[in-house]
Amino acid sequence: MHRPSCTRGLSLAGFLFVAILFASCRVSAQEQEEVRGAAVEPADAPEIRAQMAIAENLLGKTPDRGAILYFLAESHAQLLEQRAAMSRLSECIALKEGFDPDGDPAFAAFKNADDFIKLVQQVHRDFPAIARSRLAYTIQEKDLIPEGLAYDPLGDLFFISSLYRRKIVQIPRDGLPTDFVPPGRDNLLPILGIRLDPVDGSVWANSFLDTGKTELLHFDRAGKLLGRFSIPGKEKHGFNDLVVLRAGVVYVTDTLAHKLYRFDAKTQKFEEQLVSRPLLQPNGIAITDDEQTLYVADQLGILHVDLAAHNSAELDPGRHNTVSGADGLYWHKNTLIAIQNGIGAPRIAQFNLSTDGLHVLKTTVLEYRSTFTLLPTTGALRGDDFFFIVNSQLDNLNGTRILDPLKLQPIRIGVLRLP
């Protein structure tokens, strides 16, 4: 992730929390202005309203009504429309899908309200805390502000990307981290999603600033920069997460432009991939083992993209369940592993899918409301073990500046044994 501006939602992977944090700061300022009799609307109100219009148009047209309601509740809160925000939030919580507004900065102005407290209590009765993870690695470089994580089976090590230091660190099995791509060498932007090329083991990564400048990066196995690629034109883009196919094709989610792109390493050209509905802040992305199906996550759900048939459809989460807001998304044995940051309090969940991949048959919450879900972002699979960033500390980064150095903690990597 990067340092978001005050636009709503994710500016980079997992920056949902930071963007909302700044939105809550605007709420406080707004309330002060209202006391003096002057209402001040957020500067990004037109963008917020445009995204709300898209979401409202999808009500009744997608299987996850709760996701749209939660998105609208957050949006109303940022526009300081508290009555509308509570109405949408109450309707969302009544669906019992797993949305948890507790601690969500978007609702900071509500935290002491009786109605809000009752909603949180209801959620926690319906969805108890789950703690299954254990500590795998600790990184002492506190200001790393990590976002992406990838496993290299050839070297038996992990790569972790840094937003603040703008570098990539490698972590061998013994847990002694070293720089794979050192800071300052290639004048890089903050680095987000990171994946390994399945053919040669080279490293692909996304980078971007919330100003709209973004690059897809390619490094060899020694960390040498092989190429940096961007989309020409004046439109703002923000490459977030990615998957790499054996044929030399990279799919990237563009969070700022709300799009999905296909990059051909041979022609070095980007092509927008149209899907069945508008995307809102697309983030996590996963590919099946046979590379025939792509799963793309955004704030409203997950889209199933059939690469052979060139069509897409909404993944149906089933009743009392949500697949929305996935920051990290991974394919594992006909299941999807998701780090869901966009549903309020984060959780890690595993979704068992139908044979056609279009329906969730079973949901297993793996981690929720524990010391391992402080502010997770992405993860990586090593066999049946799922490793993930526990405390990214994204909420302590503002652009190129650490907000409070005294609050920084060593970075923890957790691990879950998948059922």
Image (spheres, rainbow, N blue to C red):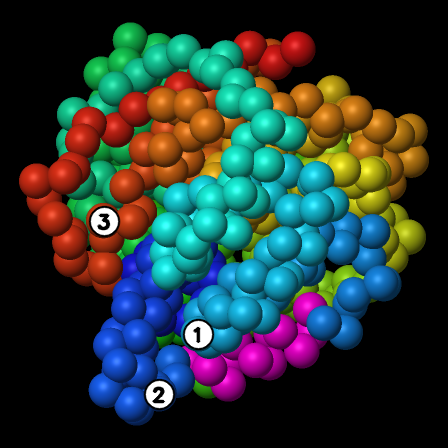
- Are the residues flagged by discs 2 and 1 in contact, CB closer than 8 Å? yes
| Identity of the residue furthest to the left in this view | 406
- Report crowding for label 3: few under 14, some 14 to 19, many 20 or more residues within 10 A (C-alpha): some
Residue for badge 1? 80
Q: In the figure, is residue 292 to the left or right of 34? A: right
Q: Is mark 3 on a helix, strand or loop?
A: helix
Q: How far apart are marks 3 and 2 (CA)?
A: 28 Å
What span is colored magenta in the figure?
A: 44-55
Question: What residue sits 69% from the left and 31% below the top?
Answer: 336
Q: Which mark is residue 6?
A: none
Question: Which numbered disc, 2 or 1, marks the residue that appears first in the sequence?
Answer: 2
Badge 1 amino acid = Leu
Badge 3 amino acid = Asn
Residue for badge 2? 39
Q: Identify whether 14 is placed above or below 56.
A: above
Quarter of image, res 215: bottom left
Position of the C terminus, as image quadrant, is top right
